[in-house]
Amino acid sequence: MFQPLAGKRVIETTQVLAGPYCTYQLALMGAEVIKIEKPGQGDWTRQGGSDADLEAAGLPLSFVTQNAGKKSVTLDLKTPQGLAVLKHLVQDSDIFVENFSPGTAARLGIGYEDLSAVNPRLIYASLSAYGQDGPIGHRPAYDHIIQGMVGIMHTTGTPETVPLKVGSPYVDYASGLMGAFAVLAALLERERTRKGQRVDVAMLDSAMLLMASLAVSTLATGKPPPPTGNEAFSGSPSSGTYKTNDGLLSLASNNQPQFARLCKAIGLERLLSDPRFAPGDPRKQNQAALREEFAAVFATKSADAWEAILDEARVPAVRVRRLDEALNEPQLAARGLMRPVALPSVDREVAIPTLGFKANGDVTAAQSPPPTLGQHTDEVLGALGLDVARLRVEGVV
């Protein structure tokens, strides 16, 4: 199995989504991830959810999604004993990940300077809304706040519907992946320099980089991109989304060979000799007329039928699917992107994400279920030679 981080220990104090998703990637790659949680409460995502049994076990789906393969240790970091225990753990760890608001970790006594003094080879990763510096670096935020900040809402939808938020918390997930990327890069840099590293990941930066080409264009021209709805990003006159007789079809015909194959496949070969639709400016200038020709034809069959026809013609096209339909696609099953993990405390299985890429032809999935709150406190702290029973009586764990 692909386990490049086997033997590495990660201590995390993160909560909710971006931070836990970052450390989940590290756990999938073989790291021992110890999740520090507040006694009696834990990660905020342990509360709530629509499944009463999972909520009662402290394992709502919002927690399960990005916390499998980790160990849970409860520790009150606002007590001197809790702080001392954390530093003890850090001494023999490789990576520390936090997603407090900037300045909070330092006030708790677990900032970069505090922990690097304990372990000079430590990789210290901070994930925050706006970063550790800058005029608004101190502000907290969530996914939809960052979406509003970076302009993505003004590129989503049509002129009549903007601004619109992207449905999934994609900024959180992108920031988690960026965090894992940063940690892996920092580990390589530590090998090169023999020194610990500090990495600073901002949701703001991650979100803006997801729109890199739009940002570059806006800076170069001074003009923000207009909302384009379901049109193709390429702007090709022959690409976009069309109504069929039972749903929507998205297709891409971005070059002349694809355009020719498209026209032949849908019975509009005559358009290839029509001067209005010659490559380049004529086709762009007559885009509306071209779209009318396409729309009339696509309305005659189902989206599935057109998907099959265009696939045979080697024109990229797909029926627009709901999420439940996409999750049941044979291709997704073949990729192994979602794999079941057992939840012993509730006698259930839940399908959760795997690593997101295959390594050596294999899927890398979580090797253990998400932990119940404090499940590994005795194991982890006992291995340090600590009197866990006494710490529990004192309210430290």
Image (cartoon, grey):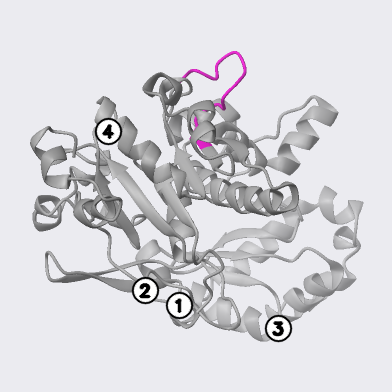
- Does label 3 or label 2 sit earlier along the sequence? 3
Answer left or right for 122 relative to 344.
right
Q: Secondary structure at mark 2?
A: strand
**Looking at the image, which is closer to me, 143 or 227?**
143
**Disc number placed over residue 254 in the picture, else none:** none
- Report the Cα–Cα distance between label 3 and label 2: 33 Å
Q: Amino acid at mark 3?
A: Ala
Q: Is residue 160 visible?
A: no
Q: Which residue range is magenta in the image?
A: 126-139
For the point 27% across and 33% down, which residue is it?
A: 82
Residue 135 lies in the magenta-colored region: yes
Contact between marks 3 and 4 (CB within 8 A): the answer is no
Q: CA distance from mark 4 to mark 2?
A: 36 Å
Circle nearer the N terminus (3, 1): 3
Residue highlighted by disc 3: 313
Q: Say few, some or many: other residues with alpha carbon within 10 Å of mark 3 (under 14 / 14 to 19 / 20 or more).
A: some
Q: Residue at x 51, y 42 (%)?
A: 171
Circles 3 and 2: CB atoms closer than 8 Å: no
Q: Residue at x 31, y 69 (%)?
A: 368
Amino acid type of disc 1? Gly
**Residue visible at 60% across and 40% down?**
206
Instruction: Check disc 4 and report its element: helix, strand or loop.
Output: helix
Q: Report crowding for label 4: few under 14, some 14 to 19, many 20 or more residues within 10 A (C-alpha).
A: some
| Mark 4 lies on residue | 82
Q: Amino acid at mark 4?
A: Gly
Question: Tag 1's secondary structure?
Answer: loop
- Mark 3 vs mark 2, foreground winner is 2
The residue pinned by badge 1 equals 336
